[in-house]
């Protein structure tokens, strides 16, 4: 199996490291900055004898070596700075996404596209429009990351192992995301039995602001360890045909009362990509929140369309 990662910054390089060191696939890392991808790839290749994996890692500025890729992960784009929303990146990263997908389809037209660049839901829409691929093969990483943050904050509150927490976050990758406390448990115990309501609300709010919290702490750049872990989980589920049900940004076609909008929902990921969109039983309030989040995403998509008329 082969994965190409576009963008050799912190997110892209860490994705490459996680995928290679887990022996999920061989990795080609590409970046417009001369020497950046090649240098990081060589460094990772030299770590292989120590770590003990057999994945081949290479890098460069040319898209041609992406030929034969099973999945292309697109991380290329400007990172957020303190005070910026994900939507503020729309003009710059929308243009970058268009250029990257145009180049990738020349050499790897059949590769699935996994979007990471923000604003995530809109760049996924752009990638699908430019590539012309069906929804099963163009999707975005956000829900896995947002859910991991939610799970981590729940674990911190309860004082348990993070792996004991099961949760789900739906909706757009931004302040309108929809964490689902009603569907969240610790070793099968509903968190509503373990955490007071006001603390659950605080955790939900922190989850929505989880990316901004890290941006504020770092001052320069944004999160990359957890996003890379999320990408590796999604890529592994697809290339190993593990069929994990993971929150994924995907084009909806009537599910949840939504049509032709890209938003995060549970999806089964296997060798065919998005093999099933799973419909969770939502309360009226939860469904209303999801639809409001989708409306925000659609508004940002319309803003992108207006910019490019």
Image: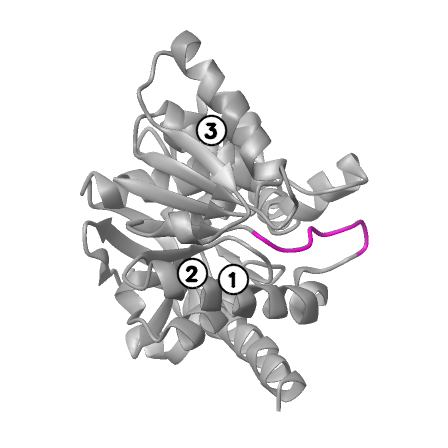
Q: Main secondary structure of the magenta part?
A: loop
Q: Is residue 125 magenta?
A: no
Q: Residues within 10 Å of mark 3 (few under 14, many from 20)?
A: many
Residue sitting at x 67%, y 84%: 307
Which residues lie in the magenta part? Answer: 76-83
Q: Nearer the viewer, residue 184 or 66?
A: 66
Mark 3 and 1 residues: CB-CB less than 8 Å, in contact? no
The residue indicated by pointer 1 is: 100
Q: Is residue 180 visible?
A: no
Quadrant of the frame with the C terminus:
bottom right
The residue indicated by pointer 2 is: 104
Question: Quick check: 210 above or below 175?
Answer: above
Q: Residues within 10 Å of mark 2 (few under 14, many from 20)?
A: many
Disc 3 to disc 1, how far (Cα)?
21 Å
Q: Nearer the viewer, residue 145 or 235?
A: 235
Mark 1 and 2 residues: CB-CB less than 8 Å, in contact? yes
Circle on res. 17 = 3
Question: Quick check: 177 above or below 24?
Answer: below
Q: Secondary structure at mark 2?
A: helix
Question: Quick check: 300 above or below 109?
Answer: below
């Amino acid at each position: 199996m082969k994965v190409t990662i576009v963008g050799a910054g912190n997110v892209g390089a860490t994705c490459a490291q996680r995928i290679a060191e887990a022996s999920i696939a061989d990795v080609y890392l590409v970046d417009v900055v001369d020497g950046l991808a090649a240098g990081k790839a060589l460094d990772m290749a030299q770590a292989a004898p120590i770590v003990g994996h057999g994945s081949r890692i290479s890098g460069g500025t040319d898209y041609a070596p992406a030929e034969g890729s099973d999945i292309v992960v697109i991380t290329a784009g400007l990172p957020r700075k303190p005070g910026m929303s994900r939507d503020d990146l729309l003009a710059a990263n929308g243009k970058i996404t268009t250029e990257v997908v145009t180049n990738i389809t020349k050499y790897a037209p059949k590769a699935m596209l996994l979007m990471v660049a923000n604003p995530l839901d809109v760049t996924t829409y752009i990638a699908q429009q430019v590539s012309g691929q069906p929804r099963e093969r163009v999707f975005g990483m956000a829900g896995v990351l947002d859910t991991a943050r939610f799970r981590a904050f729940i674990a911190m509150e309860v004082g348990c192992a993070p792996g004991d927490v099961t949760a789900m976050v739906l909706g757009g990758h931004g302040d309108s995301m929809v964490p689902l406390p009603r569907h969240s448990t610790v070793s099968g115990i509903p968190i509503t039995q373990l955490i007071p309501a006001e603390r659950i609300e605080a955790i939900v709010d922190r989850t929505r602001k989880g990316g901004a919290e890290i941006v504020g702490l770092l001052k320069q750049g944004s999160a990359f360890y957890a996003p890379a872990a999320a990408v590796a989980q999604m890529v592994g589920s697809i290339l190993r045909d593990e069929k994990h049900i993971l929150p994924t940004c995907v084009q909806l076609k009537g599910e949840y009362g939504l049509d032709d909008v890209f938003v995060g929902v549970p999806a089964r990921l296997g060798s065919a990509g998005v093999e099933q969109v799973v419909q969770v039983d939502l309360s009226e309030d939860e469904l209303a929140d999801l639809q409001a989040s989708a409306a925000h995403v659609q508004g940002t998509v319309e803003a992108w369309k207006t910019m490019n008329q």
